Amino acid sequence: MKIEILGPGCPKCKKVAELTEQAVKESGVEAEIIKVNSIKEIMNRGVIFTPALVIDGEVKSTGKIPGIEEIKNWLKK
């Protein structure tokens, strides 16, 4: 599983990264977590609001901090 956190590195972006790492650990899934900080790369993906969470190429969340249970649910699918 490939998980990407898109954002410039703001506090919200860091919180999404922290929650995602915790959700992966608690779920026991194998995942590679990548942080994408390039505004150009973020815009190329059609994301306007950051932070964004992308799982296996599918944008799951933009412009907010999702809850850990919500992230765990996305990891199961």
Image (tube, helix red, strand yellow):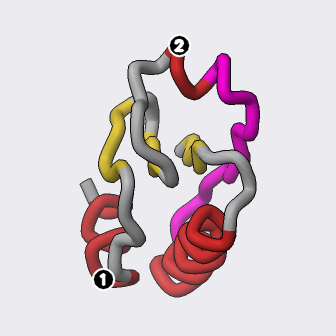
Element type at mark 2 = helix
Q: From what the image shows, is residue 15 above or below residue 74? A: below
The amino acid at mark 2 is Asn
Q: From what the image shows, is residue 20 above or below residue 40? A: below
How many other residues sit within 10 Å of disc 2, few (<14), some (14-19) or many (≥20)? Answer: few
x then y, percent, for residue 77: 25, 53
Question: What's the residue at 52%, 66% (across, down)?
Answer: 29
| Mark number displayed over residue 33 | none
Q: Which residue is at the front of the view, 35 or 27?
A: 35
The amino acid at mark 1 is Glu
Question: What's the residue at 60%, 76% (across, down)?
Answer: 15
| Mark number displayed over residue 69 | 1
Q: Is residue 46 left or right of residue 42?
A: left
Magenta stretch, residue numbers: 29-41
Q: From what the image shows, is residue 60 above or below residue 17? A: above
Q: Quadrant of residue 68?
A: bottom left
Residue ID for mark 2: 44
Q: Is residue 54 left or right of residue 16?
A: left
Q: Quadrant of residue 9?
A: bottom right
Q: Rounded to the nearest whole Å, what is the CA distance between mark 1 and mark 2?
A: 29 Å
Element type at mark 1 = helix
Q: Is residue 33 magenta?
A: yes
